[in-house]
């Protein structure tokens, strides 16, 4: 058998494809605005005490917080001194599991370290939030799940021309997102914005305090406030590439879930491989193969706890089960009201009636067991 001769233009096409991927990375890393706050501003006593005021909200009755507060001034002063002479080292983590609804491994840092996380977040968040695209919705002030759902509705109506044309949706999910964030890549992204090497040392101390069970230098703990910000900084590289290089006009991302709308199914199919390559080569992330799907809007799109259709939304079965389970365990008025607020975003008359009945029964058990005589 003779060797198959591959025309030279095929190699040029392949080379051009990868150049297209990495050109996007290069463009995104160029001409960044710079973080102007200094290391001293982050570790200053004024910022640490303001961070404490924010941190303690809702935690004042926790044993570890009360213990730290008993010698608050000495503890904060010691943290400040350790940061000032750069002898600070992040402590280990207490780990536990929650089911929300899937099983998640949470890592909780000590109070001293969580206080520092808030001090860092106070300075970094306002700066980085300005660099994010408007269609990134996770863990941002003025954004969140409900705003993402509103954006989903607006983009689907626009692409489908008020439900008169077929609207295709590419839905993707990143595999083990937080546990796959590469520390070196993250620190390089941060260093591209932050010229102060003392700040980079501090961020490295926090980031390198955790790694996943299988690989050193990879992963962020779900329990850290800074992890939410760092995840958005990490994925902002992808967001910018999606918008400016891949030209995905109708794109929404919430944490590790993202959707793209188009009238053209083949356009979305052609996007999958470049997306896969960029995430893999640029950010060391992997798409869930079984969760990367293209469907019509009319067939129902499962996104952020709802199944979205052109004229209505259905609450996911797992979301409903989680809601009733939490209400059963904690039949508090604020939880009940928050779920009523959630249900206003879809077609949920029947579920709302069930919820109201369940809440009434949970709070009137004694009357149900021992009804008053007429």
Image (cartoon, helix red, strand yellow):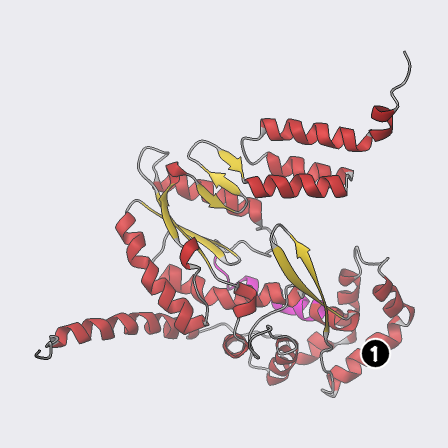
Kindly identify the residue that appears in the image at 48 percent across and 40 percent down.
Answer: 307
Q: Quadrant of the N terminus?
A: bottom left
Q: Which residues are magenta?
A: 118-134
Which SS does the magenta portion mostly show? helix
Q: Residue 369 vs residue 118: left or right?
A: right
Check residue 131 for magenta coloring.
Answer: yes
Quarter where residue 39 is shown:
bottom right
Q: Quadrant of the C terminus?
A: top right
Check residue 80 for magenta coloring.
Answer: no
Quarter where residue 66 is shown:
bottom right
| Whole-percent x, y for residue 218 in the image | 55, 75
Residue 303, compared with residue 355, is above or below; it is below
Q: Secondary structure at mark 1?
A: helix
| Whole-percent x, y for residue 114 in the image | 73, 69
Kindly identify the residue that appears in the image at 29 percent across and 48 percent down.
Answer: 265
Residue 246 appears anywhere in the view: no
| Whole-percent x, y for residue 168 in the image | 34, 44
Q: Residue 17 vs residue 210: left or right?
A: left
Q: Residue 136 vs residue 23: left or right?
A: right
Kindly identify the residue that appears in the image at 42 percent across and 67 percent down.
Answer: 279
């Amino acid at each position: 058998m003779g060797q198959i001769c591959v025309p030279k233009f095929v190699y040029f096409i392949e080379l051009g494809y990868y150049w297209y991927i990495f050109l996007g990375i290069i463009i995104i890393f160029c001409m960044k605005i710079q973080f102007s706050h200094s290391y001293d501003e982050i570790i200053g006593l004024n910022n640490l005490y303001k961070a404490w005021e924010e941190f303690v909200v809702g935690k004042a009755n926790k044993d570890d917080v009360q213990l730290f507060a008993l010698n608050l001034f000495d503890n904060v002063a010691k943290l400040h001194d350790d940061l000032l002479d750069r002898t600070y080292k992040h402590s280990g983590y207490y780990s536990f599991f929650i089911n929300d609804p899937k099983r998640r491994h949470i890592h909780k840092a000590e109070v001293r370290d969580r206080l520092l996380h808030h001090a860092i977040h106070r300075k970094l968040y306002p700066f980085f939030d300005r660099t994010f695209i408007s269609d990134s919705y996770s863990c941002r002030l003025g954004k969140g799940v409900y705003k993402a759902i509103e954006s989903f509705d607006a983009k689907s109506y626009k692409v489908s021309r008020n439900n008169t044309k077929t609207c295709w949706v590419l839905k993707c999910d990143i595999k083990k997102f937080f546990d796959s964030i590469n520390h070196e890549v993250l620190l390089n992204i941060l260093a591209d914005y932050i010229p102060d090497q003392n700040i980079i040392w501090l961020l490295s101390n926090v980031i390198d305090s955790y790694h996943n069970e299988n690989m050193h230098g990879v992963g962020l703990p779900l329990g850290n406030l800074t992890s939410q910000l760092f995840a958005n900084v990490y994925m902002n590289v992808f967001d910018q590439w999606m918008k400016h290089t891949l030209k995905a006009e109708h794109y929404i991302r919430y944490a590790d879930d993202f959707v793209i709308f188009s009238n053209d199914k083949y356009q979305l199919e052609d996007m999958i491989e470049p997306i896969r390559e960029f995430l893999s080569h640029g950010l060391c992330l992997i798409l869930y193969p079984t969760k990367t799907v293209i469907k019509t809007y009319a067939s129902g799109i499962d996104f952020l706890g709802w199944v979205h259709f052109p004229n209505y939304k259905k609450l996911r079965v797992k979301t409903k089960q989680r809601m009733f389970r939490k209400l059963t365990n904690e039949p508090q008025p604020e939880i009940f009201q928050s779920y009523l607020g959630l249900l206003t975003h879809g077609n949920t008359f029947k579920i709302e009636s069930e919820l109201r009945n369940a809440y009434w029964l949970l709070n009137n058990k004694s009357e149900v067991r021992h009804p008053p005589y007429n």
